[in-house]
Image (cartoon, helix red, strand yellow):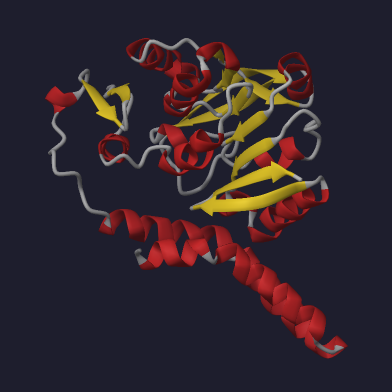
Amino acid sequence: MTIYHTLRSYWWDAALLMRHLRRQQSKQGKRLWWQFLTAWESATPSLYHNLQVAYRRQRPLPEETISPQMYGSVVTVEDIRMRIDPRMSPYQVQKLLCGRHTRHERHLVIPRLEPDDIVMELGGGIGMLATACALKIGGDRVHSYEANPFLESLIRDNYTLNGVNPHLKMCMLGRTADTCTFYVSEHFARSSTYKLEAQQETTACEVPVEPLNDEIQRIQPTVLIMDVQGSEGELLSFADLSSVRKLLVEMHPNILGISHVNALRRQLRNQGFLETERAGQSFFYVRQ
């Protein structure tokens, strides 16, 4: 395990420990701890980003050299066939070839899927996780939503390569029906409603927004998967999770800050969800 992974693994726990210590101090001590914690959390997004950059610079490259001739070909990763597409950056191709693309999410949720589950995925990416779910329980029981309009043909191509056909909607989900500015990053996995200073190469486009709770009411998901690049904070503040038995959320402290991420974790615990496992930034919950 690299030092980056170690630091990331204990990132949230360190914040919670500091809060605990702060509560144990005198009033003067509380003020000192609060000042330190506030300063630390305000620096979190830039520090977190710098750690990510340092890690990527040290990451091992796949054995196979990436060349222009590879684009358009199909690779098999853990029995899932995926297209290497020109819309993917060299870094994204490296992650796919190394098996790291959606690895945490797949290893957390796929073994826990049951035949009667209905999966609702927010943030479909290039369709790898929805494909894995469909291979396990059938495409009719998987519903995926992706806001990036440039990925639709690639997603459907990857579905076809694996002989599955999950329900796919190209839209964002929010509180009400609307439109929203969406920033498409050169690194598609970082596309978001948030335009980060570190992401210079982005294209702004208007995408449709459909009401989240209307879709939840229609689908009645038992498994909710959420990788929405920071929008998890807003969506979880009003999402109706009454039908959800299993929940997978990728948290984004580089966008929200640690204080907000820990507040989301407490909120989910208060709603009856037990945090059972974590891999990287992905947290898996089951309803108690």
Q: Nearer the viewer, residue 37 or 221?
A: 221
| Left or right, residue 287 beside residue 129 | right
Where 20 falls versus 91 (above or below)? below
How many numbered dots are placed on residues in this image? Answer: 0
Q: Residue at x 56, y 65 (%)?
A: 11
Residue 47 seen in render: no
Give coordinates of residue 189: x percent, y percent.
Answer: 45, 35
Give coordinates of residue 126: x percent, y percent.
Answer: 42, 24
- In the picture, the quarter occupied by the C terminus is top right
Q: Indicate the quadrant where residue 201 lies.
A: top left
- In the picture, the quarter occupied by the N terminus is bottom left
Q: Residue at x 77, y 28 (%)?
A: 243
Q: Nearer the viewer, residue 227 or 89?
A: 227
Give coordinates of residue 115: x percent, y percent.
Answer: 58, 22
| Left or right, residue 175 beside residue 134 | right
Q: Residue at x 38, y 33 (%)?
A: 186
Where 189 falls versus 137 (above or below)? below
Residue 160 seen in render: yes
Give coordinates of residue 269: x percent, y percent.
Answer: 77, 51
Q: Indicate the quadrant where residue 15 lies.
A: bottom right
| Left or right, residue 237 beside residue 94 | right
Q: Nearer the viewer, residue 42 or 231?
A: 231
| Left or right, residue 47 beside residue 265 | left
Residue located farthest toward the front when viewing the structure as drawn: 115
Q: Indicate the quadrant where residue 127 lies.
A: top left
